[in-house]
Image: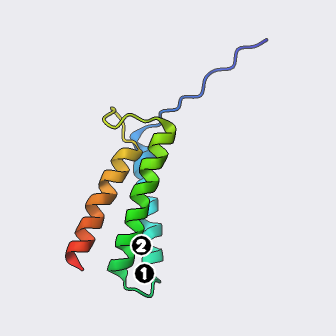
Amino acid sequence: MPHTPEIPRAFGSAQALTRFFMRLVILSIFAAFSGQGFGKALEGLLAFAVFYCIFSAAIRREKPFGPVLTHFDEAAAFVVIARLVAWTS
């Protein structure tokens, strides 16, 4: 029986950055078409993104302070952006 190579679970930081910016663009588009106003809608969507990132990191058992960017890092960035949006609106 041939040995199949293991697929690495850890991806590079480039994938995390791509994921982060793609989510930010998608959430911004949804917030732009919201009836509540851009700032308030973006703040709420970013809060949901924080919970999603934490949940994803817990499911994948990622370490919070690893050598590469993880879902925990994305959650921290989304928290900072959400607070900036709340402060400016």
Q: Position of residue 79 (x, y in %)?
A: 30, 59
Q: Is residue 6 above or below residue 16?
A: above
Q: Is residue 7 above or below residue 21?
A: above
Identify the residue position indicated by label 1 in the image. Answer: 32
* In this rendering, position of residue 19 left or right of residue 84: right
Q: Residue furthest left?
A: 87
Q: Position of residue 25 (x, y in %)?
A: 43, 67
Q: Position of residue 64 (x, y in %)?
A: 34, 37
Quarter the N terminus occupies: top right
Task: Tell me the residue at 42%/69% (across/down).
Answer: 45
Q: How many angstroms separate mark 1 from mark 2 (CA)?
A: 6 Å
Q: Residue furthest bottom?
A: 35
Task: Tell me the residue at 37%/73% (across/down).
Answer: 42
Q: Quadrant of residue 68?
A: top left
Quarter the C terminus occupies: bottom left
Label 2 crowd bin: few (<14), some (14–19), many (20+), radius 10 Å: some
Q: Is residue 2 above or below residue 88?
A: above
Q: Using the image as rendered, state which of residue 82 and residue 19 is in the foreground.
A: 82
- Residue 28: give its label: 2
Task: Tell me the residue at 25%/66% (across/down).
Answer: 83
